[in-house]
Image (cartoon, rainbow, N blue to C red):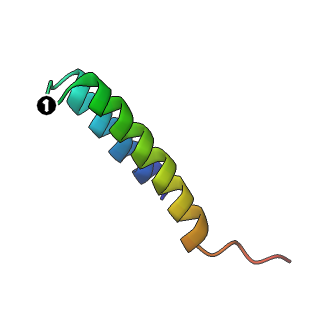
């Protein structure tokens, strides 16, 4: 899940910097927002492993 979150953030960042789909400031903000919010949601919504 974290890898998917990272890949989506990277795609947004590259879309702004390399693809010129939107300004660089939007690319940075979008990538960071996806990484931070995504990581938080993944940590909150997934079950921890069973303790033995």
Label 1 environment density (alpha carbons within 10 Å; few <14, some 14–19, many ≥20): some
Q: Is residue 2 left or right of residue 18?
A: right
User: Is residue 2 visible to us here?
Assistant: no
Q: Quadrant of residue 14?
A: top left
Q: Residue at x 34, y 40 (%)?
A: 30
Q: Residue at x 34, y 46 (%)?
A: 8
Question: Where in the figure is residue 18, as x and y percent of width and height?
Answer: 21, 21
Quadrant of the snapshot with the C terminus: bottom right
Q: How many marks?
A: 1
Observer-nearest residue: 20 or 47?
A: 20
Observer-nearest residue: 27 or 19?
A: 27
User: Is residue 47 visible to us here?
Assistant: yes
Q: Quadrant of residue 44?
A: bottom right
Q: Which residue is mark 1?
A: 21
Question: Where in the figure is residue 15, as x and y percent of width and height?
Answer: 21, 32
Q: Is residue 16 left or right of residue 3?
A: left
Q: Residue at x 37, y 42 (%)?
A: 9
Q: Quadrant of residue 27?
A: top left
Question: Where in the figure is residue 6, as x and y percent of width and height?
Answer: 43, 44
Q: Residue at x 15, y 24 (%)?
A: 20
Question: Where in the figure is residue 24, as x and y percent of width and height?
Answer: 27, 23
Q: Against 38, is 31 above or below? A: above
Query: Of helix, strand and loop, which one carries label 1?
Result: loop
């Amino acid at each position: 899940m974290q890898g998917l979150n990272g890949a989506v953030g990277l795609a947004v960042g590259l879309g702004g910097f390399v693809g010129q789909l939107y300004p660089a400031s939007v690319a940075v903000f979008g990538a960071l927002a996806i990484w931070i919010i995504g990581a938080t949601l993944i940590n909150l919504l997934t079950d921890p492993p069973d303790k033995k």
